[in-house]
Every structure is written in C-alpha cells, then in structure tokens.
Image: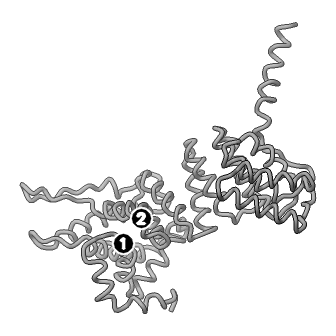
Amino acid sequence: MKKLLFIVLIPLLVSCGSSKYSIEQPSELIEDQPLNAQEEGWLQLGIISHDEQDYDQAKEYYKRILQQKPNSASALYEISYSSMESNNLEEALVYLKQGEKIDSENLYLFYHMHGITLDMLGKPKEAIKAFKKGIEVNPNFHLLHYSLAITSLNVGDSDQGMISLQNAVLTNFEHSSSHLLLGNLYRSNGNTIPAILAYTYFLFYESDTPRSDEVFQLINESFDSSERDTTTNEINITLNALFGNSQDNEQMNGLGTVIALHSVSSKYKKEGEQLSEIEFLVENYEYMLNLLGETQEDYEEKGFVREFYVPYLVQVKEAGYLETLVYLLFEHSNYEGVKEWIINDCVKCEEFYEWTPGE
C-alpha cells in the first residue's frame, strides 16, 4: 500500500513543481484599473529609475501604485519588466501572471515578456506556449513571432522557426533582425538564393552596422562560388552552396546551379582581368533577378520568397534602377569605388528615391 501511494504521489509532486511555469487561461478577465494623476507620476518616476538601471527604486514606485490599484496593467507590466531586468525572474513571473488576468490592450505584451522570462529560466517549451498565447491575442506583433522563432530554433524545431520568421517579416517588414535570421536559416539549409534575398532586404533597413559588414561578406561569398588556381589558371567551381537542400519549397535549386555557373563567367570575363567586387555583385544581381523574373509565373504556389521577396526587386530591375540600388545598399561596404560612384556617377539616385513600384 505504501509503495502504491509513493508511485501515485510522484506525478503529483512533479505536476505541482512545474505549475508555476505553466501558462494559465483565466476563465474571465479582470477590468483594468486606470491611474490617477499622482499614480501616473509614480509610474513615470519608476520608468526613469528603470532607464537609469535603478531597478529597486523603480519597483518601489510601482509598488506604491499596486497598493492602491492592484489590478493596474501598466504598473504590473513595468514592475515585471524591472524584475526581469534585475534578474529576479521568479518575481517577474508572479507579476506577469497577475497581468495576464487583466483585460488590457497590452495583454499580448505580458505573454511576450512571460515567454522571454521562461526562456531565461531554461523553460523553452513553456516559453513557446506563452509566445503562442500572445500571438492568439495579437497576431500582428512581430516580436512575438520573432521570439517564438528564436526559441523554436534553440530547441531544434527549424520548421516552426522558419514559419515564425516569415510571419515576423510579414507583420513588420522593416524589422531587420527578422530578415537577417531568416537569411541565416536559409543559408544553413543550403538555400542560398533565398538567403541572398533575405540579406538584401536586411540591408534595406540596416546597412551601416557591424552586422551589415557581415552581411556584405555573406552576399559576396554566396555569389562567388569559384576560385582561379593561380598555378594552373584553372577555375574551380563550388556548386553545393547554391544547390539548396532536397526540400526546396521555393523551387530555386536549379536556378542556383545556373547562377553559380554564371558567376564564373562574370567574374573572369577576360584572361587575367577581374571585375571589381561591386561590379561583380551588380552583374550577378542582374542575372539572378532576370532568372527569377522569367520563372516567376511558372509556379501557381510561389512560396514565401517568390511571393514577398522577389516581386519588388524584379520591378526595380525592370525600371532600370538595379545598379543604383546595389550601389546604395553597399555604400558602407568599403568596396572600392562604391562611394565615389554614388557621389559622381549616380545620376539616377534622386530619381530612384522618388520612384514608386508599378509606375
């Protein structure tokens, strides 16, 4: 009898031990308590203290509010944030769970921070549930999709990671980190053309940072799949980088082979003569987008890249602005001749800035 009781208690104890990390669904949300002028003042003082990294002082201001308005969503969110930033993660969870019981316009933000806190606590599966709950509340908040992608990738779920990154891009196309991580994921899967396109859109929104320096190099390396042996003068081609994997949902593996071969001819047009780095990039962007444009209508189901990455760039090329765009994207690359070209020869720069797709 004692043995049976022990066996029954084990799952009960495990369940109790993990319940504080579970994502609860309130049967009914509580009404948010608005703040008066004095309480708003305390809230602002708390935010100032938080920004100065004086988290204890910040929490004292928030606690003043919560003594009078225990169901203030704004105070609960800010005190959760200060608790998390000061690494009091268990404390943050208490306030976050209380905030998730309140009917507020920022409910999705509680679930987002809840997920981040759980991830920091080493609870990625629970974090994923929190992010997904937040997405149910507000599917248009890009950082929920982005955070879900990161945590999913960290637990080895690359399919969810890919879907979530694509959703992050669709909900905020200007979020450069989503393009960058999506490009890295395409590249790690061997899908180099989608990776180049994702990196290109990253540069639209972030072209002068240490991260952009890495992206300049990644794009160049992705196109540059050949080396000339200086002893024999033979050209060696590396096609694997552009082939893609066996699960090519974007239908681009064959194009990768063609582009890889073209990169050789464009780089070594004349014996002993080589294009500059920026000329090589312009040439290969032109060739790649020609191929993508010509095959765009061959697929009824185009996939994410053909649906959202390809059309604008093809329109840029068809409007005659591709060279201008490539030079502008690589302005801070330190590639020889780029800045001089923009200053002295970019006759279409102003025209391109005023151009609207579809014109």
Nearer to the camera, 2 or 202: 202
Residue located at (19% from left, 58% from top): 227
Instruction: Please tell me whether residue 260 is drawn above or below residue 284 in the rendered image.
Output: above
Nearer to the camera, 77 or 107: 77
Q: Is residue 259 left or right of residue 14?
A: left
In the image, residue 16 lies at what x, y percent? 81, 29
Using the image, tell me which numbered label, if any, was put on residue 78: none
Residue located at (91% from left, 56% from top): 69
Mark 1 near mark 2, Cβ–Cβ under 8 Å? yes
Q: CA distance from mark 1 to mark 2?
A: 9 Å
Q: Is residue 21 visible?
A: yes
In the image, residue 260 lies at what x, y percent? 29, 63
In the image, residue 278 lies at what x, y percent? 28, 73
Q: How many marks?
A: 2
Q: Is residue 132 visible?
A: no
* Mark 1 or mark 2: whose residue is earlier in sequence: 2
State which quarter of the image contains the N terminus.
Answer: top right
Using the image, tell me which numbered label, if any, was put on residue 332: 1
Residue located at (44% from left, 79% from top): 314
How many other residues sit within 10 Å of disc 1, few (<14), some (14-19) or many (≥20)? some
| Secondary structure of residue under mark 1 | loop
Q: Is residue 133 left or right of residue 294?
A: right
What amino acid is found at the position of numbered circle 1 in the picture? His
Residue at which label 2 appears: 212
